[in-house]
Image (cartoon, helix red, strand yellow):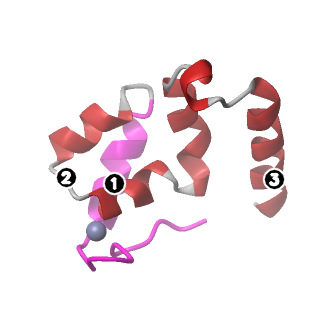
Amino acid sequence: MLFPIRCFTCANEIAHFYGEFERRNKENPHTVLDELGIYKMCCRMIFLTHASNILDVAQQFEYKKLTVSKNTLKSMSSIIKAKK
Ligand SMILES: [Zn+2]
């Protein structure tokens, strides 16, 4: 799935940050977005919920806080793989 060129809500151009965000996918995503200068919640939401990196972002958080179980992640990854 392609990353959107602009934010759906505020129309800010965000696509040119995606490469750096994806390259640093093992770091805390909130820190990476802060360092890239993406502070608006609407733009951050697009990075954090993009289908190709949702699993990387979800694994950065403790499973108990998000109540995301490993079975949920497995089912999410199978859905994403099926769409590719
Ligand atoms: Zn935005």
Query: CB of mark 2 within 8 Å of CB of mark 1?
Result: yes
Label 2 to label 1: alpha-carbon separation: 7 Å
Look at 79% across and 51% down and name the residue there: 81
- Residue 79's disc number: 3
Q: Quadrant of the C terminus?
A: bottom right
Q: Residues within 10 Å of mark 3 (few under 14, many from 20)?
A: few
- Tags 3 and 2 in contact by the CB under 8 Å rule? no
Mark 3 or mark 1: name the one nearer the start of the chain: 1
Camera-side residue of 9 and 2: 9
Label 3 to label 2: alpha-carbon separation: 30 Å
- When the figure is inspected, residue 53 is found, relative to residue 42, above or below; the finding is above
Q: Residues within 10 Å of mark 2 (few under 14, many from 20)?
A: few
Identified at 75% across, 53% down, the residue is: 80
Give coordinates of residue 57: x percent, y percent.
50, 36
Mark carried by residue 44:
1
Bounds of the magenta span? Answer: 1-25
At horizontal 31% and vertical 45% (from top left) the residue drawn is: 20
In this rendering, the answer to whether 55 lies above or below 48 is above
Secondary element type, mark 2: loop
Q: Nearer the viewer, mark 3 or mark 2?
A: 2
- Residue 33 as seen in the image, left or right of residue 29: left
Q: Residue at 33% x, 64% y: name it.
A: 42
Tell me the SS state at disc 3.
helix
Residue 56 relative to residue 76: left or right: left
In the rendered image of this protein, does residue 72 appear above or below residue 76?
A: above
| Residue type, mark 3 in image | Ile
Residue topped by disc 2: 39
Q: Nearer the viewer, mark 3 or mark 1?
A: 1
58 in magenta = no
In the rendered structure, which amino acid carries the disc numbered 1?
Arg
The percent position of residue 19, horizontal first and vertical second, equals: 36, 51
User: In the rendered structure, which disc, 3 or 2, sits on the residue that comes first in sequence?
Assistant: 2
